[in-house]
């Protein structure tokens, strides 16, 4: 997702899931595939290298699950300070759990 209006539509839909390190907001789309958006705040990650690392990890977790995801617009936001210091595998597993919960809760089939 690239446009601010697309992000606003997901925020306005108000379907969200929160885990230990991430918040995932979702909205069904008409495109037939899942799309990813990220909000990585400078307040949580003051250094650009840390924000970029968080984005890379989020994108990689999304790529691994993308083929099995329904047509949803997903916005992922790290929300805990511990997300920066947590072990990488724990972060990835938490993000996968968050994405799966969001699909169950916000999917149009449910």
Image (cartoon, rainbow, N blue to C red):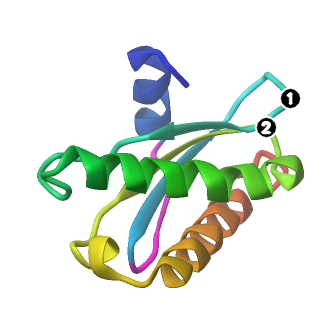
The C terminus is located in which quarter? bottom right
Per the rendered image, the range of residues in magenta is 14-20
Task: Tell me which numbered mark, 2 or 1, is placed earlier along the sequence.
Answer: 1
The image position of residue 52, as x and y in percent, is 37, 46
Q: Quadrant of residue 31?
A: top right
- Please name whichever residue, 82 or 15, is drawn nearer the observer in this view of the structure: 82
Question: For numbered disc 1, what is the local secondary structure?
Answer: loop
The image position of residue 79, as x and y in percent, is 29, 64
Question: For numbered disc 2, what is the local secondary structure?
Answer: loop
> Between marks 2 and 1, how big is the CA–CA gap?
5 Å
- Whether 100 is among the magenta residues is no
In the image, is residue 100 above or below residue 9?
below
The image position of residue 50, as x and y in percent, is 28, 55
Instruction: Say few, some or many: other residues with alpha carbon within 10 Å of mark 1 (under 14 / 14 to 19 / 20 or more).
Output: few
The N terminus is located in which quarter? top right
In the image, is residue 58 above or below residue 72?
below
The image position of residue 72, as x and y in percent, is 70, 40
In the image, is residue 24 above or below residue 52?
below
Query: Residue at the front extreme?
Result: 49
Identify the residue position indicated by label 1 in the image.
32
- Please name whichever residue, 92 or 25, is drawn nearer the observer in this view of the structure: 92
Identify the residue position indicated by label 2 in the image.
71
């Amino acid at each position: 997702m690239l446009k601010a209006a697309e992000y606003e539509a997901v925020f306005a839909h108000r379907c969200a899931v929160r885990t230990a390190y991430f918040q995932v907001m979702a909205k069904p789309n008409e495109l037939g595939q899942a799309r990813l958006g990220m909000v990585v705040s400078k307040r949580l990650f003051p250094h650009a290298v840390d924000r970029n690392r968080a984005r890379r990890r989020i994108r990689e977790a999304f790529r691994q699950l993308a083929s099995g995801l329904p047509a949803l617009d997903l916005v992922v936001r790290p929300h805990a300070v511990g997300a920066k210091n947590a072990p990488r595998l724990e972060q990835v597993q938490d993000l996968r759990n968050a994405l799966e919960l969001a699909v169950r809760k916000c999917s149009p089939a449910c």
